[in-house]
Image (cartoon, grey):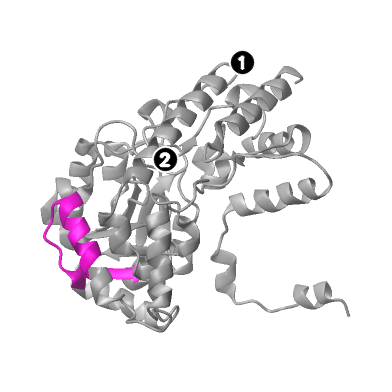
Amino acid sequence: MLVAEKTASVPFAARMADLGTETAFEVLARARELEATGRQIVHLEIGEPDFPTPVHIVEAGIQALRDGYTHYGPSAGLPETRAAISRYVQQTRGIPVTPDWVVVTPGAKPIMFFAVLALVDSGDEVIYPDPGFPIYESVIRLAGGRPVPIRLREDNHFRMDADELANAVSRRTKMIIINSPHNPTGSILTRGDLEMLGRLAVDHGVYILADEIYSRILYDGKSESVLKVVPEAADHVILLDGLSKTYAMTGWRLGWGVMAPPIAAAVARLQTNSNSCTASFSQRVVETALFGSQDAVQNMRGEFRRRRDAIVDGLNAIKGVRCLVPDGAFYVFPNISDFGMPAREIARRLLEEAGVAVLAGTSFGPGGEGHLRFSYANSIDNIREGVARFADWVSRL
């Protein structure tokens, strides 16, 4: 019997049907298949900085390996790492958190899983953005929760509408997930938005999972956090952050959550039962990254701004496309509804016919229909080539 035939008959647990995926990796796999046939593909699908990890951070990692940080550490993280993160949060969010508020994880994504698993019971409702990072809904369903999407609309600059959010809160609401700067649209929540969210959490006794992984990739103004705007909501907030996006360290798998100590203890227990701990040598670079030279971060952000302006101008020059200027992250979310085709079909045809890998807006939820997501974490030459191919493809419709 063939392996494929055996696999098809595997009686998977019912919960596996609730787990989604990230379309970006599926599109990347198809793009690689085309490249293997000799096609040249412009990759604008993956949300990963294309810069090297700053040298001084790499050197700190090498030194940690030489110093023997190659063994197990505490599930919640090395004490010195938790202390460095708590100090960083005090400085950037203005609240006096201590190390027992911090759990260090292999990448920031486990905080999504652990926070939902620790707090959401079967039937509890979790409000999340649509379009939004697809793993939010996936984790909610896996935990037995009921996903409650809040539509992010282009005419509101892809921000949560306060009235819709208030109406969505019910007696079953356990958590609200927010993401600012936002993937896939690059929008940000205003100080007023965050104040409303913080007050709502306190008044209704719900938790906020604040995904701030892109907080340092902001082009104008300063980064705001619900923790800073409504400090009295701190016991209701789980802050998600990490090194991956800011320092081009996706492969180092270093993230963290900041939350009230009783929740942190539960999250650490979940980590004990899954990952055991985060790699010790990766943890040893956290202080160097957060408190060492930030020149590479500033340079990277400046280059992202240049790319952002180029891709927005290029897309808006294409007939039938309109694209808002994103405030943060490294994504644009152009509207392509004038073409009268589903976003998934346009994304497929762009890859197969024009050699441009992008994501359909519906990869991030039904609210993404009529849009595509372009990542500008690529060279400006490749961005211009990708936009030119898109324009040529449109001209032939």
Residue type beneath disc 1: Lys
At horizontal 52% and vertical 21% (from top left) the residue drawn is 322
* Magenta highlight range: 83-104
2 or 1: tag closer to the N-terminus: 2
SS label for mark 1: loop
**Left or right relative to 213: residue 166:** left
Residue occupying the point 16% across, 48% down: 228
Kindly indicate the quadrant of the structure image that contains residue 317.
Answer: top right
Dot 2 amino acid type: Met
Which residue is identified by label 2? Answer: 300
**Foreground pick, 123 / 104:** 104
Q: Does residue 380 appear to the left or right of 158 in the view shown?
A: right
Rendered view: 226 above or below 360:
below
Where's residue 145, x and y in %? 41, 64
Image position of 290 with respect to 49: above or below: below
Disc 1 crowd, CA 10 A, few/some/many (<14, 14-19, 20+): few
On the image, the x and y values in percent for residue 14 come to 58, 73
* In the depicted structure, whether residue 157 falls above or below residue 48: above
Q: Residue at x 62, y 54 (%)?
A: 25
**Badge 2 density bin: few <14, some 14–19, many ≥20, Cα 10 Å:** some
Mark on residue 289?
Answer: none
Q: Position of residue 303 (x, y in %)?
A: 44, 34
* Prevalent SS, magenta region: helix
Which label sits in the foreground, 2 or 1?
2
The structure residue drawn at horizontal position 35% and vertical position 69%, both measured from the top left corner, is: 283
- Quadrant of the snapshot with the C terminus: top right
In the rendered image, which residue does mark 1 sit on?
A: 319
Does 219 appear in magenta?
no
Image side of residue 304 versus residue 347, left or right: left
* Residue 123 can be seen, yes or no: no
